Amino acid sequence: MDVPIKKYPTVGACGLDCGLCTKYYTVGPSRCPGCCGPDFFNKHPSCSFITCCVKKRGLETCGECPGFPCEKFKSEEEYQARDLPGYPPDRNIFRNLNFIKEHGIKRFVQQQRKRIRLLEKMIDNFDDGRSRSFFCRATALLDLTHLERSLKEATRRIKTEGIKPTDMKSKARLLRGLLNECAVKEGIELKVKKLRKKG
């Protein structure tokens, strides 16, 4: 059976920021290939958004559909309230899809690629093995200008404070602190809420 492959797997059909998710940057078989990326359907056999949007309508995202938003979506308030660990933040779903509806998928992807490049710099140069999900969340939620400034300031302070390039723990702490300062200004919580076990 021919499986349709999306042109932009870093953008979920449902509006999730797949290219800014920790699972997209996982090494090994548990890595998520993004929305409809290679081997996606073996890992995620069923998705009603993909069935409707990609398979039936031949679209990249629901934001391109004249019927958006439809009954498949929760209310924007519900997405704002949800915060699942390990996944891109649900709170971006309507923001992303409305941007795509107004400006088009290509413009959205250009903007997202800037975020992805910043995230990759953070992972390559500042990840102490414990900060990846924090950096993913920050790049998904914070203003692009704040992300760029924080990364530039962290790089500057590493040089001026004499932090060794191999001291990933200090580098990660420094960048996390700068990103947290921006988050406070924007009224955003960067710490991921942990799911409580029932029982």
Image (cartoon, helix red, strand yellow):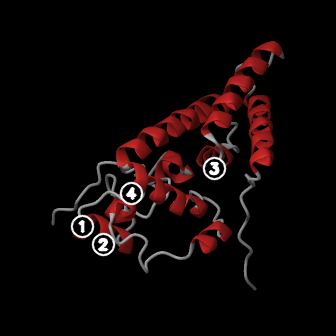
Label 4, label 1: how many angstroms apart (C-alpha)?
16 Å
Q: Mark 4 against mark 1, which lies toward the viewer?
A: 1
Residue 1, horizontal then vertical, whole percent: 15, 66
> With respect to residue 7, does 69 lie above or below?
below
User: In the image shown, does 78 or 166 lie closer to the viewer?
Assistant: 78
Label 1, label 3: how many angstroms apart (C-alpha)?
29 Å
Q: Secondary structure at mark 3?
A: helix
Classify residue 77 by image quadrant.
bottom right
Marks 3 and 4, the one that precedes in the sequence: 4
Label 2, label 4: how many angstroms apart (C-alpha)?
14 Å
> With respect to residue 169, does 131 lie above or below?
below
**Residue assigned mark 2:** 52
User: In the image shown, does 166 or 25 lie closer to the viewer?
Assistant: 25
Residue 56, horizontal then vertical, whole percent: 23, 70
Q: Mark 3 against mark 4, which lies toward the viewer?
A: 3
Q: Amino acid at mark 3?
A: Leu
Badge number at residue 57: 1
Marks 2 and 1, the one that precedes in the sequence: 2
**Residue assigned mark 4:** 35
Marks 1 and 3, the one that precedes in the sequence: 1
Label 2, label 1: how many angstroms apart (C-alpha)?
6 Å
| Label 2 with label 1: CB-CB less than 8 Å | yes
User: In the image shown, does 7 or 38 lie closer to the viewer?
Assistant: 7
- The image quadrant where one finds the C terminus is bottom right
